[in-house]
Amino acid sequence: MKKGFFHDFLVTVLILIISFFTSLCLHFILNIEAIIPSLFVLSVFLISLFTQGYLFGIISALICVLAVNFAFTFPYFTFDFTIRENLLSALIMIIITVLTSTLTTKIKFQKKVKIQAEKEKMRANLLRAISHDLRTPLTAIYGASSTVIDNYTSLSDESKLDMLSGIKEDSQWLIRMVENLLSVTKIDGTDVQLIKSSVVLEELADSVIAKFKKLYPNQNVIISMPENFVTICADAILIEQVLINLLVNAVQHAVGMTELKLNIYVKDQKAVFEVIDNGCGMSKEKMKNIFTDYGASGNNPADGTKQNMGIGLCVCASIIKAHGGEILALKNTKGNGMIFRFTLDLEEADDE
């Protein structure tokens, strides 16, 4: 509330100062008087347009009338409230202020309603995606556990181990899904403060690969890193989650993949991160809304496995956006597959 008031106050003061000194130049240097009242009317309109409510618009209208009376009406630099034109000008400016403020208030309210409607639509898409995505692993966990319990003595040790391994895998997937959903809630919140710190790219990559290897110990990742010491200012935990999500998505959805790469390099004072696979790729239709619709636009995996890709990539986009970066999905021009690329600003050098 205080921040908005201070912003409106600065906007009002700035516009009034510019209008007043411009009018002084027109009147006393260029000897142009006719457009000065119109200039102050314009300033009142702009103030009403760029500030909240009616307060600053009405105050600026009164100030403009006093300014015209004081500096641009003979005798100059004295107040003369007997002039009827000034009273009429004040009335016209106040009417302009009220009409403009009313119009802008309605427009801003309509924008809020539209944004709220979009959020509700996204929330509905997210709930549909969740209900669909959670049903498959939960059904598999329930079926496997019921089979082991009901047929414990008749099942071989190998069958039991196979079913328990499936339960473990589905449980891990559910845990990652919950982590993604918590990240969506965190990043979409209006009062969230990212916990930024100095992050060394090499240490970040080592941590990501270590955690990824726990999930997929048999999946090799080819890593390319800058030779020099490079740091970024970011929330390390969230950026790790982005990279892990991208690597996991490649494993789960890049059918036929034989090579998975993690490239990190510096370009134009930005750290560039790329996860590259040579799998089945993705159609242009799926790529259009891949970071925004929580998997509601047909982002189904080609192999029919679990569908956490839409939610995972939405989390990635939210995190990168919160850091002021950009994320893209591109076709791999050097062969089949995809390139998921995002950029973050490098940490500013310490003067000391």
Image (cartoon, rainbow, N blue to C red):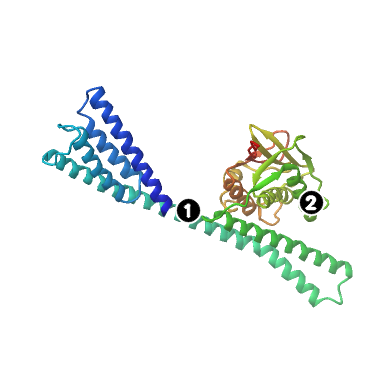
Q: Residue at x 64, y 40 (%)?
A: 347
Q: Which residue is drawn at 14% across and 41% down?
A: 81
Residue type at numbered disc 1: Glu
Left or right for 323, reference 337: left
**Which quadrant of the rendered structure holds the N terminus?**
bottom left
Disc 1 target residue: 118
Q: What secondary structure is found at the residue carrying circle 2?
A: helix
Q: Residue at x 24, y 25 (%)?
A: 28
Q: Is residue 68 above or below residue 208?
A: above
Left or right for 347, reference 156: left
Q: Is residue 167 above or below residue 335?
A: below
Left or right for 187, reference 335: left
Q: Earlier in the sequence, mark 1 or mark 2?
A: 1
Residue nearest the observer in this picture, 18 or 236: 18
**Which quadrant of the rendered structure holds the C terminus?**
top right
Q: Where is residue 319 in the image (x, y as percent from the top left)?
A: 61, 49
Q: Position of residue 326 (x, y in %)?
A: 59, 41
Q: Position of residue 184 (x, y in %)?
A: 59, 56
Circle 1 residues within 10 Å: few <14, some 14–19, many ≥20: few
Residue type at numbered disc 2: Ala
Point out the frontmost of discs 1 and 2.
2
Residue nearest the observer in this picture, 284 or 74: 74
The residue most toward the top is: 30
The residue most toward the right is: 157
Q: Quadrant of residue 231?
A: top right
Q: What secondary structure is found at the residue carrying circle 1?
A: helix
Q: Tell me the tag on residue 73.
A: none
| Marks 1 and 2, how far apart at CA | 38 Å
Residue nearest the observer in this picture, 3 or 234: 3
